[in-house]
Image: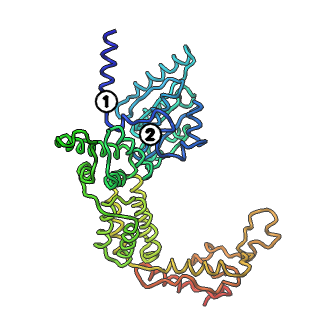
Amino acid sequence: MSGDLFTSAANDRLARRAPLADRLRPTRLDDVVGQEHLLGPGRPLRRLIEADRLSSVVLWGPPGTGKTTLARLIARITAQEFAELSAVNASVKDVRELVASAQVRLGERDVGTILFLDEVHRFNKAQQDALLPSVESGLLVLIGATTENPFFEVNAPLLSRSTLFRLEPLGPEALRSLLERGLTAETVEADDDALNLLVDRAAGDGRHGLTSLEVAAALATGRLAEDPAAADSVARVTLADAEAALGTKALRYGRDAHYDVISAFIKSIRGSDPDAGLYWLARMLEAGEDARFIARRLVVLASEDVGMADPMALVVADAAARAVEFVGLPEARLNLAQAVVHLATAPKSNRVYRALAAAGTDARAAGTGLVPPHLRDAHYQGATGLGHGEGYDYPHDDPRGWVPQAHRPEEVEGNVYYEPSDHGFEAEVARRLVDRAVTPDGCDS
């Protein structure tokens, strides 16, 4: 009996000393912030959890988005036995022992087993293979959590037997709501600019936001304790407290500045100034700008302002965008910086942009826009009788690898949209087009 009392007391003290993020873990689905696409009324994951009909799932998302929180909620709601393993230190032996226990539990008590496997991407192939038969048979319902792309890190057979749910970074409103709960739990208040800074720098990570708030609250409480005149006052987190907790200074970055800075960023790269591009990149990152937004703008710029003058520009920009998702900040700052330097120093051409605009004008203009008969699909039965494909010249049958023939509706066949510049690789493209020039009637010019 005394052992139980001591254990209970220890648990209570641990709960009081637990990090703020752990103390604020929701106990109801309605208390979860963010992830409305999964947990809103009538949404798929919510329905499965509430009905206790969950099948194996993989929860994929950045840190601090609620993967472990969801698993803990399922543990509270489910009538099944809830077991937990960490892929960091679990072995194949641990998996086999768990499977054996699940078989006994199902046979003796008709109770199923849910296994929460954190960091599932760290399980090697042998460990994942040991799980597969039990997941396939339904003996175990797997809840796997991962920050890495499961298509790369989780065995295909295991992934194919699980439903993939992607958790998104928490938005500013969700983060603010979460931090306001933290203020209540810490019995402190906060200035708006301090709360705004904590929200911005959390970058969608709820755990990071609460950890920073906990430090800032401790600083505010300590300052209050040193002031005898403020003994009955409530501690208040200031901007200075938030800056100290984050180890950084707040940059003033309002809505207007957001658009002004991204405009300066794009125009600097378009103007072939890598140093200016890097400066504005650093300004945005230090101000907590969404790295995915920056990456999207670079991908657009690669085609809009560099285009065919350096076709690799789009590959580099796309790789940087993928790195933001795959690696994340702060490391992906380097990938973004490399893309900025490549795009800024690349030869420039907006001819692809202009060509699409000109083609769009024709596409919207009056006219039939009929596909020429020789280009129409001739694969289905009866198409040949309609004249589809008749007169089509297969380019690979020509030793040059191309043939002069009409490829557009008659009313726009002679219009030229793409006129390559003489910048970079586009000069080579221009030479190729001159060699293959075709007149409107489909004959060599």
| Residue placed most toward the observer, 273 or 92 | 273
Q: Amino acid at mark 2?
A: Lys
Quadrant of the drawing holding the N terminus: top left
Q: Amino acid at mark 1?
A: Arg
Circle 1 sits on which residue?
Answer: 16
Residue in view at x 32 percent, y 56 percent: 193
Q: Is residue 378 left or right of residue 32?
A: right
Residue 292 visible in the displayed image = yes
Residue in view at x 30 percent, y 21 percent: 10
Q: Quadrant of residue 387?
A: bottom right
- Element carrying mark 1: helix
Position above or below: 382 against 171: below
| Residue placed most toward the observer, 382 or 144 | 144
Q: Is residue 366 left or right of residue 140?
A: right
| Colour convention | rainbow
| Residue placed most toward the observer, 60 or 149 | 60
- Element carrying mark 2: helix
Position above or below: 143 against 434: above
Give the mark, 1 or 2, whose residue is nearer the N terminus: 1
Q: CA distance from mark 1 to mark 2?
A: 23 Å
Position above or below: 1 against 219: above
The residue furthest bottom is: 445
Q: Position of residue 15 (x, y in %)?
A: 33, 28
Residue in view at x 46 percent, y 84 percent: 421
Disc assigned to residue 67: 2
